[in-house]
Image (cartoon, helix red, strand yellow):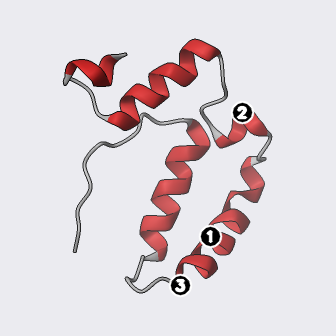
């Protein structure tokens, strides 16, 4: 597995494993219609508002839009 050789992140290794299995990698592949994406963003945003650290709606939207199309995972995280 790629992550074990130190050249890939755990997220990248999990995505590669899922691809090898033929598992869906995008929200649209599991049946989320594109016209429901804004509603999904609203629901997730409302849930995240209860976290001790704020998460902006634009960050939530970017994450879900990436997940909708199955974008490659981002291995870097910025902690505020």
Residue at left 29%, top 42%?
Answer: 75
Residue 9 picture location, percent across and down = 29, 34
The residue under the point 66% across, 24% down is: 23
Q: Quadrant of residue 25?
A: top right
* Location of residue 15 in the rendering, given as x and y in whole percent from the top left corner: 48, 28
Image check: 16 left or right of 67? left
State yes or no: discs 2 and 1 in contact (Cβ < 8 Å). no
22 to 40, vertically: above or below:
above
Q: Which SS class for mark 3?
A: loop
Residue 22: quarter of image: top right
Mark 3 against mark 2, which lies toward the viewer?
3
Residue with the mark numbered 2:
29
Residue position marked by numbered label 3 in the rendering: 49
Mark 2 burial class by Cα count in 10 Å: few <14, some 14-19, many 20+: few
Q: Are marks 1 and 3 in contact (CB under 8 Å)?
A: no
Q: Which residue is mark 1?
A: 44
Tell me if 28 is positioned left or right of 25 in this view. Answer: right
Q: CA distance from mark 2 to mark 1?
A: 19 Å
Q: Earlier in the sequence, mark 3 or mark 2?
A: 2
Tag 2's secondary structure? helix
* Distance of label 3 from label 2 (alpha carbons): 27 Å
Of the numbered discs 2 and 1, the one sitting upstream in the chain is 2
Looking at the image, residue 51 lies above or below residue 6? below
In the image, is 33 to the left or to the right of 75?
right
Give the crowd class for mark 3: few <14, some 14-19, many >=20 residues within 10 Å.
few
Along the polypeptide, which appears first: circle 1 or circle 3?
Answer: 1
Circle 1 sits in a helix, a strand or a loop, which is it? helix
Q: Quadrant of the N terminus?
A: top left
Query: Vertically, is 79 above or below 23?
Result: below
């Amino acid at each position: 597995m790629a992550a074990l050789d130190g050249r890939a992140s755990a997220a990248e290794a999990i995505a590669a494993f899922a691809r090898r299995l033929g598992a869906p990698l995008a929200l649209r592949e599991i049946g989320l219609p594109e016209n429901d994406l804004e509603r999904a963003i609203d629901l997730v945003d409302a849930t995240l508002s209860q976290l001790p650290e704020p998460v902006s709606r634009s960050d939530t939207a970017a994450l879900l839009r990436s997940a909708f199309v199955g974008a490659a995972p981002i291995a870097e995280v910025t902690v505020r």
